[in-house]
Each structure stands twice: as C-alpha cells, then as structure tokens.
Amino acid sequence: MAEKVGGGTPYAEAVLEERRRVIRNALKHEFIQKRYHPKAAEHGGVVFDAALQRWNALQFSYGEHFKPSIRNFAKFFSISILPIATFYYFTFGPRKQEWLKSISQGEVPIDHPTRKAVYITWL
C-alpha cells in the first residue's frame, strides 16, 4: 500500500534518466577534449560530429531519393494550390464579376455602403 501513495518519478524512468545523464556527461567530456586539444587548431577548431554529418547528408540528398506518389501530390496540392485557388475564387470569382457588371450597368449607386467599403480597402 505504501508504494502506491505519493507521486514522483517511477523507478524505471529514474534509471533511464540517470543513464541519459551519464551519456550526456560522457559526450560533453568527449567534445571538450576534442575541442580544446592542441591539434584541434589545425582543423580550425571544428569538432566532427558523425550524427550531425548524417543529418546533413540526409537533408541534402533528399531530392535524389524522392519518389513521386499520390500522397505527396495530395500534400502539395492541399498546402499550395488549393489555398491559392480558393482565395482567387472568393476574391475574383463569379460574385465579384457579377457585382462589377452591376456597377458598370449603373444598378449600384455611387454611395452604396458596399462600394464605399471596397473603395476603402483598395487604397
């Protein structure tokens, strides 16, 4: 019963966090040794990190391994083409053309409230 009372971090999580701390300290120690080694000045003081090199290689070679698919096209379409087309439709679509036609035919008076709002927004 006493084990279930209270809170805090479970034992397994505490052990994992301790292992992570040990690994972080070891990596920190290795970095400091490589960075401040007397021969590090020959390399311009840059410490080579294999994980960072792998990540950079992945980022810059993505285009070489790209395979077009319906899912990729759907993402592209929904993120770029669809919003632009929707905005264009609502901005310059049939309602706008009909409204402009009614203005040119003289059906909408000069002092109509919607015309005033449009003049303000077109400034």
Image (cartoon, rainbow, N blue to C red):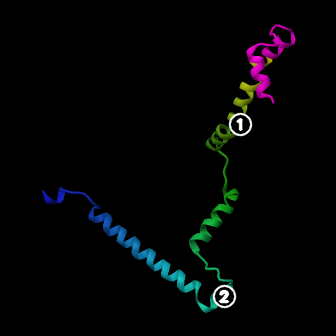
- Helix, strand or loop under label 2: helix
Q: Residue at x 61, y 42 (%)?
A: 71
Q: Residue furthest left?
A: 1
Q: CA distance from mark 2 to mark 1?
A: 51 Å
Q: Is residue 102 magenta?
A: yes
Q: In the rendered image, which residue does mark 2 sit on?
A: 41
Q: Position of residue 44 (x, y in %)?
A: 69, 83
Image side of residue 27 versus residue 79, left or right: left
Question: Closer to the N terminus: mark 2 or mark 1?
Answer: 2
Q: Residue furthest top?
A: 107
Image side of residue 5 versus residue 101, left or right: left
Occupied quadrant, residue 75: top right
Residue count near mark 2 (Cα–Cα under 10 Å), binned few <14, some 14–19, many ≥20: few
Q: Which residues are magenta?
A: 98-123
Occupied quadrant, residue 12: bottom left
- Helix, strand or loop under label 1: helix
Occupied quadrant, residue 14: bottom left
Foreground label between 2 and 1: 2
> Foreground residue, 99 or 13?
99
Q: Residue at x 12, y 56 (%)?
A: 1
Q: In the rendered image, which residue does mark 1 sit on?
A: 81
Identify residue type, mark 2.
Ala
